[in-house]
Amino acid sequence: MTVRQTSATSLALGRAAQELALKRGELELALQLGQVRAARDDGGGPPRVERREIDRLRAAHGFPAALRERLRTVGTVDGAGLVSISQGRFLRLARTGHFAPVRFYVNRYHAVVWLYLAEEVLDFARDHAVLLTGRTPPEVRALLAAGEDRRPRNWRGRRLGQLLRASSDPWRRAAAIAAVLDPVSVAEMVPDPYERSRLGVLRPDMVPAPPRSLRGREIVERLVTADHPDEILWHRASLADALREAREHSAAPRRVPRTPYAAHAPRTADAPHVPRTPHAALGLAPHTAARRAVPHPAVAVAAASRPAPAVRPPRSTRPWSRPSSSRPGHGSRGTARGLLGRLWRSRAGRA
């Protein structure tokens, strides 16, 4: 027996994570950031990582520590400690949009935890050292006083950019833009129900692992949907351009109505015309309807020898019918039934 050694040209995400010494969440983040390139499955399945991409990353200097360092994320506590500032100052800088979160999750207390790339936090501290010490600038204080929180908006913009770069299909790009708009805006921008259905089928997953609880899913849906007027206007204009490009590329599939065979089946020149019968109306084939319409000869002979049933005369012409009583709602004295009838007959007998 001969054993043939073969190597897969592409790997599933779980196997690719093992080859790269990454956790599954780290690999998903690497795919979003473009640190690991993956090929999309044409059949609609999950993406796969090519073997040559695995070999390229494994041959890089400092693998796997360097790759994992580029994917390291920090929260508010770890981020503040990374750049040696207080947690309050780090939170104020994040709320005013000085660095954008790369992902988020909802914990068991239904609180939103934002995560940032450690590499980007270090770059910000190096380029904006003046914001790390001293008094907070007036423009930052004004934004905080107005209740500004740009973290959801910055995350949506970042995630949408990742989705648009990952696909070249016009309909998928339009579906990615529609994913950050509320259903009312999408219905206004896409009045055609078939196009809306196509966008819904191609809608990407904005969050890899949504929470299981209903309240957690509501929080995620609120964070995914654009809420600022300027942001909504920008995405609506982007969706209009993407739809124009998608329609020029290909039309949305239309549903063809199914019709009965008997009503629309083509007839040949030598085929006899069969009149419409209840069988044909139910969708049976013409020859089946014709065969069922003609009875068997034995059945026809038996039906001919059977005497015709007697026809009962109408109720008004029956000889035994009596005139109805003059009392409304009652029959005659002889045909009255029930308790009232017995009382009526006994009274008539005494009279």
Image: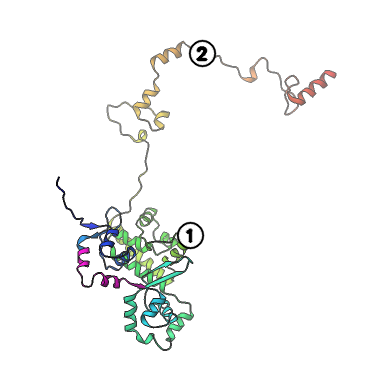
Q: Is residue 338 left or right of residue 271?
A: right
Q: Indicate the quadrant where residue 181 lies.
A: bottom left
Q: Indicate the quadrant where residue 302 lies.
A: top left
Q: Is residue 300 left or right of residue 58?
A: right
- The residue lying furthest to the bottom in this view is 134
Percent of width and height locating residue 40? 27, 58
Viewer-nearest residue: 268 or 26? 26
- The range drawn in magenta is 53-73
Question: Residue 302, which numbered label?
Answer: none
Percent of width and height locating residue 193? 39, 54
Residue beneath the point at 37% across and 67% down: 235
Residue 341 visible in the displayed image:
yes
Residue beneath the point at 39% across and 17% down: 296
Q: Quadrant of the C terminus?
A: top right
Element at label 2: loop
Q: Indicate the quadrant where residue 251 lies.
A: bottom left
Amino acid type, callout 1 = Leu
Work out how far the residue at label 2 is from the one at label 1, CA to CA, in angstroms.
Answer: 72 Å
Magenta includes 224? no
Residue 167 visible in the displayed image:
no
Percent of width and height locating residue 154? 38, 72
Amino acid type, callout 2 = Ala
Q: Are marks 2 and 1 in contact (CB under 8 Å)?
A: no
Determine crowd level at label 1: few under 14, some 14-19, many 20+ residues with C-alpha closer than 10 A: few
Question: Residue 308, which numbered label?
Answer: 2
Q: Is residue 264 above or below residue 303?
A: below
Which of discs 2 and 1 lies nearer the camera? The answer is: 1
- The residue lying furthest to the right in this view is 351
Which residue is the site of mark 1?
A: 214
Element at label 1: helix
Viewer-nearest residue: 341 or 276? 341
